């Protein structure tokens, strides 16, 4: 099953040194979504999304692996939490 999201606004481009992660948090048409990366890793998802023109449509190929923890859902209001190893398709403008 594929889920299509429209990334509407970049809310935060952040790093968390204590957890050794970085991320991009967006407001989407379905709620907040965060894309995660690790320090010292290629982080292709973050590289692909950083500085993109918004709004932007993407397809999550494996949404079952992008369900946020109860903590992230409550504390950060996340609808989707995309780990660095998950792939997605970006719809390009024509």
Image (cartoon, rainbow, N blue to C red):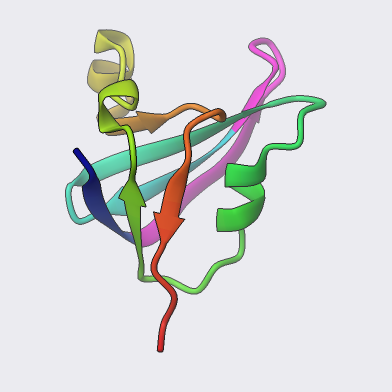
Q: Main secondary structure of the magenta part?
A: strand
Q: Quadrant of residue 61?
A: top left
Residue 33 screen position, x and y as percent = 34, 40
Q: Is residue 92 above or below residue 17?
A: below
| 59 drawn magenta | no
Please, which residue is most extreme toward the bottom here? Answer: 94
| 19 drawn magenta | yes
Location of the N terminus (image quadrant): top left
Residue 46 screen position, x and y as percent = 61, 45
Give the residue at x 40% y 89%.
Answer: 94
Q: In which quarter of the image is residue 57?
A: bottom left
Which segment is the magenta one? 8-22
Residue 56 screen position, x and y as percent = 38, 67
* Labels in figure, total: 0
Q: Is residue 80 above or below residue 7?
A: above
Give the residue at x 33% y 43%.
Answer: 60
Q: In this view, does 71 lie above or below 16?
A: above
Residue 85 screen position, x and y as percent = 55, 28
Give the residue at x 56% y 30%.
Answer: 84
Please, which residue is most extreme toward the front here? Answer: 1
Name the foreground residue: 13 vs 34.
34
Name the foreground residue: 67 vs 60.
60
Is 51 left or right of 93, judged from the image as shown? Answer: right
Is 9 left or right of 52, judged from the image as shown? Answer: left
Is 68 left or right of 88, judged from the image as shown? Answer: left
Give the residue at x 56% y 35%.
Answer: 23
């Amino acid at each position: 099953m594929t889920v299509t999201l429209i990334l509407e606004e970049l809310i935060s481009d952040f790093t968390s040194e204590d957890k050794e992660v970085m991320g991009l948090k967006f407001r989407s048409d379905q709620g907040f979504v965060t894309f995660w990366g690790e320090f010292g890793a290629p982080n292709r998802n973050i590289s692909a999304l950083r500085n993109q023109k918004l709004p932007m449509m993407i397809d999550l190929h494996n949404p079952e692996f992008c369900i946020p923890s109860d903590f992230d859902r409550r504390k950060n209001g996340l609808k989707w939490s995309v780990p660095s190893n998950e792939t997605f398709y970006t719809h390009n403008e024509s």
